[in-house]
Amino acid sequence: MKKRLLAATMAAVLTAGLCAGCSSGSSAGNSAKTATTQAQAEGTSAAGNTGQAAATGDEEITLRFSWWGGDERNAATLEVIEQFEQLHPNVKIEAEYGGNDGYHDKLATQLASGTAPDIVQVDPEIFPTYVYTGDYFIDYKDYEMDLSNFEESYISLPINGGYDGKQLGLPSGISGAGILVNKDLADAIGLDFTKKYDWNELIEMGKKVREYDKDLYLLCANKEYIANLVVFNYGKQLIGAPFFDSDTGKMNITEDQLKQVFDYVQLLYDEEVVAPASYQASYSNDNLQSDANWMDGKYVAAFTYVSTIDVMVAANPEPNYYLSQLPLLAGSTESGWASNTPQVFAVTKTSAHQEMAVEFMNYFFNDETAVATLGCTRSVPPTEMARKICTEKGVLSQYTMEGADIAATMGGTPNDKISSSQESKAILFDSVETIGYKASTADKVAADAINLLSGLEK
Amino acid sequence: MKTRNYKARMVRDYLIIFIIGALLLYPIIWMFFATFKDNREILGSIKLLPEHFRFDYYIQGWKGTGKVTYTHFFINTFLLVLPTTILTVVSSALVAYGFARFKFPGKKILFAILIATLMLPNAVIIIPRYTLYNKFNWINTYLPFYIPAVLACYPFFTYMLIQFLRGLPRELDESAYMDGCGTLRTFMQVLLPLMKPALFSAGLFQFLWTYNDYFNALIFINSVKKFPISLALRMSLDAESVVQWGKIMAMAFVAVVPVMLLFFAAQKYFVEGIATSGLKG
Amino acid sequence: MKQKKISHYKTRDYQAFLYIMPWILGFLILQLYPFMASLVYSFSDYNIGAKAEFVGLKNYSKLFTGDNEFWNCLKVTFVYTLYTVPGKLVMALAVAVFLNRDIKGINLIRTFYYIPSLFGGSVAIAILWKLMFLDNGVINAVLNTLHLPTVQFLGDTRYALKTICALEIWQFGSSMVMFLAALKQVPRSLYEAAEIDGASKAKRFFRITIPQITPIIFFNMIMQMIQALQNFTSAFVITEGGPLKSTYVLGMKLYKEGFSYFKMGYASAISWVVFTVILGITLIIFGTSKFWVFYGDEGDF
């Protein structure tokens, strides 16, 4: 009898563990209070809401703020958080930061289950997917967000957070793409990137480099950069429009046009403008700075985004550099690229303290101390005011400024939301890879790609 | 004659052991020395030993990112891993006992279900689980790890203990019952001591798995303050800064040390458990 | 005389339910419910955030007929499994048998051999592996010193998968430890009796050792197979499924479809296919186990 009692007690103890979990979890655990109904009520109360209600109260407020970044960015952001907390003693901001890898996968899960942080940093090319699959973000215009420092034409662009007249996201900086040129090496070989040039000239330059020294290549690249900066740009320049029409959801690019683009990609590999595909395989995605050839100064130039310029330079700091444009197609009206932001910041509708979250964003973007602290850890700041402060303080790197300036001069059309989706990009990355490995010919790859891309049409 | 052959065989045996060991451990040894090298020395060189033994990378790495140091990350890891391990071993043992030593209606079906759950891919259940845990407000706590442990949701260990128990002769149970023991007593006084090696194995494995876990931690733990080491390590690899391999290797190595120490320590118990077997002949 | 199957349960037997109660709870709430939920998802078009719409078998038909990546994934996953599971088991068994004798310092040796297994699924080790096998990594540096050409372990479609397999097989230590434990459990008396009967070493090995440890072999085989078919981390971290999808295992495809493309319905369908494959193979192995697995409780389960 006693033994049976013991056994029963043990089982009970174990199951009690479950119940203990239930009760302790709700009190101790989650700091984000997900109050959907409250959020919706707050959302509809438009600009009339003074926003002071939550701010100066004695109410203890906790906000969750997520971003990705490296050491410098994290340190700067944490400092800004601390500054804000000192100004608002009743507010605590929980920092949720980490690496880029897996960030958006996790964010998607959180958005779907209503557990996303109050303030989120999002990739501007992934942002549209969230905007169109659910109503997750507040409109800054409904709240007391001071947008006067931003240029209206800049922030109303979808890529910078403006959707259908609503400001769902705020751009964190000015970014764009370009070519980082190793001046010393380019001069030695006699290559000039300072003027406008077209795609064919790029090939010629590549050939010249190989003739000069068999150990050198013209461009540091991988399949992702080639897809993003060559396929998209060449393609858009060719058809004068983005790959898909945002409004109708139909494809603009035809198989012939795509074949022409892929023919060019084939040329890049055949003429050895870039290193062999099997070599590039080790440095895919955002890992160009680890490319051993780059670190050894064996490339004349590299594809970059403005936000990665400093990283590339740091990997090989000895030479002098300058920034250059991407190639243009002769006779095209469309440059295919423009400056855009490296990230957007949004406040989620499930936040229980939307006014305070917006207050923090106000501080983040408009306060002089905050701006000076953040410097260019997120590329060139998006507001004129911030840029001035950073230049005065000398925290803006010369190369980053150069890159941003060049990007700003291009007025091309950014990618539409369909072609910038992960799925579409995967199709193009795979296509470039197949061509690079000579596993198939440009026309077959184009046919396959068109087939797969048409599956993305709405 | 015999001694010469014997000695030759000994030498040969030890040579083989040494070669295998060297091959197996080379990556770890390399990693250890890499913690002292800068990027140039790590890539493209076969030299095992670095030019200088600098501890910079350890110091820099330990500081972590932001304000959270690796001291904190280690504490988090142990807070996460130890309870999970203990709870798993206890509950799995009890459940295994139920399956291995009793006949009851529906046993075959339930056992089949247990085996089936072995094959449940984690990715299938992760999203519904996340939503469920969210309803209980367990996200950003370590409960998503503790609760499955309490409820023996790691069928691997239950199965392993069942198999082990089946290897122990029934006579032990029978003689205990004849001595007047109830089921619990039989379990705790007769079978449990014999199960020590298996229990230790289970505990060690669960410790390792939870310690090394990345995906689940990534999904369920949000604040950096609560990060275990696996997440902290990954964080230092962000592509936006220049990758210092030495620093990463340093922290990776530091992360591995407690596990190795534990294993060295537990080894003794492990051996003793095997040496004493319950029944002879 | 074959023992008649007991059809009555002793009262004591019902206590079993108390012991397995925690698991039943866990199973129902944390396994069955999510499992069923994902089945429902697999029949629907569920993009994260939007409402799930029922679409019947569309996901499955697309998977089998419209998705050319799927069959490649299956092939890659099978090849991976066929390399790593036997590879690991054979290595583990061979080394365990080799070490199962009076060797001085056996504990130390066993500990050292086990060390690679300490890193199962560890991101840190995956990164280390990648670092070592880079074109200019240390492995190639060694090859070059031996005047062998550089091998593109990660970039060449012929070698990438094998490199990933190598990482897995390198970690055979865990299986080895289990085999060692099992070998120690084989009663000495059996060997002594066989020796008296004049059996050779080989005979003793194949007729006594192997049969005695078949439960552990069986257990290891099943577990490794299940794990291998779901492999994700190493392929994801080291080669990202490349080059040219030569390491694109099913686990990765599932993750991509679900978490990168947000097609949870489609991803659930994939996971169910994975599950069915695992189930099928496991049932086959279980079926054959009657013929080669030997239990101490004489199968009285």
Image (cartoon, coloured by chain):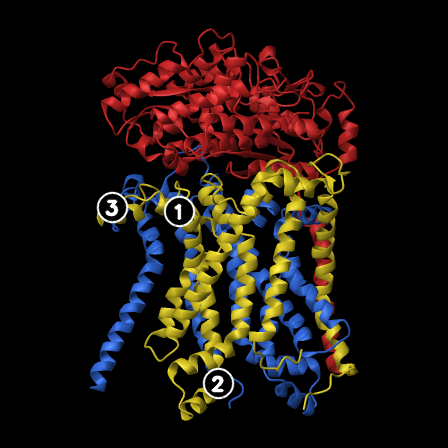
Chain colours: A red, B blue, C yellow
- Marks 2 and 1: which is nearer the front? 1
- Amino acid identity at mark 1: Tyr
Kindly identify which chain the residue marked by label 2 belongs to.
C
Looking at the image, is B225 positioned above or below residue A300? below
Along the line of sight, the residue nearer the viewer: B279 or A346: B279
Q: Residue C144 carries which label?
A: 3
Tell me which numbered mark, 1 or 3, is placed earlier along the sequence: 3
Residue drawn 65% across the image and 58% down it: B148
Q: Mark 1 points at which residue?
A: C159
Residue drawn 61% across the image and 31% down it: A120
Question: In the rendered image, which quarter contains the N terminus of chain C?
Answer: bottom right
Instruction: Determine the CA span between mark 2 and mark 3.
Output: 50 Å
Kindly identify which chain the residue marked by label 3 belongs to.
C
Query: Residue C217 at x, y = what percent?
Result: 51, 70
Residue drawn 61% across the image and 82% down it: C297
Q: Which mark is residue B259?
A: none
Viewer can see residue A361? yes
Instruction: Determine the CA span between mark 1 and mark 3.
Output: 17 Å
- Is the residue under label 3 in contact with that under label 1 (CB below 8 Å)? no
- Amino acid identity at mark 2: Pro
